[in-house]
Image (cartoon, rainbow, N blue to C red):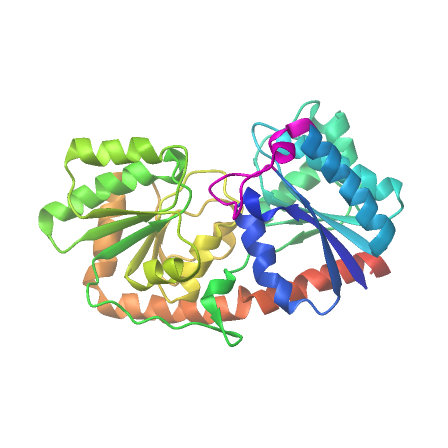
Amino acid sequence: MKVLIVRDRASAGGGIVTYYDALNDYFTVKVDYAMVGRPYAMYADKRISILEKSTLIRLLLDYSRLIYKIAVFRPDVVLVNSSIDPGGRSTARDCLNVLIAKLIGRKTVLFWHGFVSGGTQFPFIGGNKGVVCRLYKMSDAFIVLARQFKEDLKRWGFKKPVFVETTTIGKELIENGAIRRRQVPANKRSLLFLSRVIREKGIIELIDAYSILKRTHQMFQLCIAGNGDDLRYVNDYVAKKNIQDIHFLGHVTGEEKFKAFGKASIFCFPSYYGEGMPIAVLEAMALGLPLVSSQVSGLKDILEDGKNGLILGRIEPHEIADRISELVENDGLRDRISENNRKYAAERFHPRRCAERLENICRSVVTNQ
């Protein structure tokens, strides 16, 4: 079986890039890639070309490349990766990727990594009867990252098979085929937030919770890893409040990311953003970090209060502070959660497991089983 994967180019950054970079070494079928997506300077290893900066030219080149790849590689299935985003740009782009694959006569699987859930109408121009929705429905199967997303698709009139999958952990956390082990830090009050820095991720509420904790115990420290649209605002907020021992690490990858996880004792993720299944949460679990987290989107399917971490009922500073304190003060609970997370992640989120499940989905579509 041959699979052509339509995915974001490396300079687009984000979860889709991390996902396929990790899975690539574990595929047992023939795989090729057609790269798409807007490039960002922060993720690019080299200077972004003028052609890539021009949206129209880039789209035309991307579509041409997809047609060429299908003609030369002759895949049994084309796997298109997309997201339903509020702005709709990638949604419009990727429904045309589906159309191209279907017009050339290829089985097509659409993998939605991000989602806007809820409501009775498909969340894009035209709703359930619009052109975009109808183009997406041409796919032979769909993959989503949460059961609630599957329910949404069924409600919007999608009749083809829908598979619920997970994301994976970054390849920098794998060594000799196994998930790396980290040394547990002596300071059990070391907190880590690692994600795109936007307010909807609950970063301000976390900082306010940290400020509450800091009043009672000076050993608390907070590391914030990641870039994002609200990073400057968050920096100014911390400076204005004169909150001590908050360290901004910027965008971390490779060994720097592993070190950031290694210095933490609790991973904090109080997001109320429209997540799919955040890779950073899975990576924290894989390295044995207990969580204080919300249960947005796909996290509802994998997080259980008291087993994987402590789940937030409300994204509110005092509740976040109370849940962190509960973990800090209960060594047995923290150790139990740490071991549960390590075992569960090795079984479910290792890229070998994810690659195997993805291949099985594609194989079932090719064989109509």
The relative height of residue 76 versus residue 39 in the rendered view (above or below) is below
**Which secondary structure is most common in the magenta stretch?**
loop
Residue at image point 24% right, 50% down? 222
Q: Left or right? Give the position of 198 relative to 219.
A: right
Q: Left or right? Give the position of 287 relative to 163.
A: left
Quarter assignment of residue 97: top right
Quarter assignment of residue 234: top left
Q: Which residues are magenta?
A: 38-56
Q: Left or right? Give the position of 352 relative to 6.
A: left
The relative height of residue 209 versus residue 262 in the rendered view (above or below) is above
Residue at image point 75% right, 25% down? 130
Residue at image point 43% right, 55% down? 253
Q: Is residue 50 magenta?
A: yes
Q: Is residue 107 visible?
A: no
On the image, the x and y values in percent for residue 116 come to 56, 35
Task: Decide which of 342, 76 is in the foreground and name it.
Answer: 76
Quarter assignment of residue 83: top right
Badge count = 0
On the image, the x and y values in percent for residue 19 come to 57, 55
Q: Left or right? Give the position of 25 relative to 329.
A: right
- Where, quadrant-wise, is the C terminus in this rendering? bottom right
Residue at the extreme bottom: 176
Q: Is residue 47 magenta?
A: yes
On the image, the x and y values in percent for residue 5 come to 71, 52
Q: Is residue 153 visible?
A: yes
On the image, the x and y values in percent for residue 366 come to 83, 58
The relative height of residue 340 versus residue 213 in the rendered view (above or below) is below
Residue at image point 35% right, 39% down? 202
Task: Decide which of 323, 125 is in the foreground and name it.
Answer: 125
- Where, quadrant-wise, is the N terminus in this rendering? bottom right
